[in-house]
Amino acid sequence: MNRAMEVSLPPALMGVFLVDWLDEGRLVVGLQDSEDDQLTASLYIYDLQQKKLTLFYQGKDETGYEMTLKHLKDDAFAFLGRDKITIFDKTTLQPQRVIRLPPSTRGSDLSSDGQRLVFCDDRGLNVADTDLSNRKLLVKRTGQDLHVKAPFSPKWSNDDSQLLYILCLYEGTEGLGVIQPNGTGHQFFPIPDVGYTQWLNDNRQILCGQSDYIQTLSMLIDTGTGTMTNLDDERNKCGMIMDRSNERIAYALRVEEQEPYRHEMTVYIRDRKSGQDRFASSVHYQIRNISWAPSSRQIAYSTISEKGESKLWVQPLE
């Protein structure tokens, strides 16, 4: 195993909430801090060749829902916050456009051309143009109080032909829904406590699972056949993520023992064709935010120590 490289982070931060590859030589790193009782989201670019971390965006964005990066066409990318989406030029890192989200938004996503918006609010799952014109309600929020069912965390497929969402209950989630932007072809897959989702490149399969680090579940859904395949029989594999070729899966294997108490996690890589798993990192207390480089030759991830210290690592795989 090649040795991982630690990336030095600014001191006195609450933690790492985002790790994503902008290209093979640059990482986008999202860090959280607290100022005047409000969480501050800071985005840094890390240049692997220069070994330099540079701040390029900072905003007092409320958290509680996913804050993610979206790769767009025309050499651009978007930062999806809770109340707005900011589009950046991938080369200069300068902001190009800000899209304000409706009040009470509970997760949003932008189409790959940056022209269409999907978002969840108090009404349900909506699609619209980015100026909120041509708005259409696709899935209604139903029930009240303990009986509420509300879609959240929507995502466009890579070709923008389908949408997925997680159906939220008062406590936990009921499953994952898939629907076309025109409101047809609605499918629902009952999977309890879904916490993360990923469209595969075939725009047909979805990798999803629980984000609970105590008891995990990972499933591969084929929306064409309706089949669901369990990828985690032992229920100890956290944060599964597919590489861009859809040939390998990275995950954090959790080992936990009670007497004497021991908790540790290690990154593993699974080859889908052979089914073989091999370890790809040192042992850490907690591992989060695993991200594949475009070439699939390296990964990045963040760790949290038992004392709460956050670190960022780049791990060569070849």
Image (cartoon, rainbow, N blue to C red):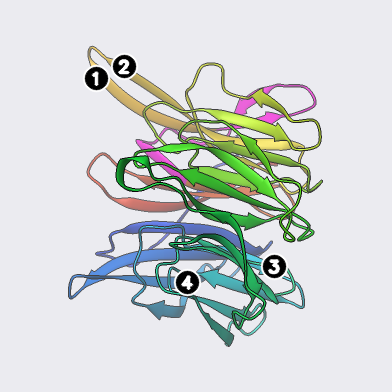
Q: Is residue 276 in the magenta section? A: yes
Kindly identify which numbered label has been placed on residue 49.
none
Magenta residues span 268-288
Secondary structure found at label 3: loop
The residue drawn where x is 67% and y is 66% is: 71
Q: Is residue 310 left or right of residue 300?
A: left
Residue 14 sits in quarter: bottom left
Secondary structure found at label 4: strand
Residue toward you, 151 or 213: 151
Kindly identify which numbered label has been placed on residue 44.
4
Q: Is residue 260 in the magenta section? A: no
Residue denoted by label 2: 257
Amino acid marked by disc 4? Tyr
Secondary structure found at label 2: strand
Q: CA distance from mark 2 to mark 1?
A: 5 Å
Amino acid marked by disc 2? Glu
Residue 254 sits in quarter: top left
Residue 126 in the image: x percent, y percent? 59, 64
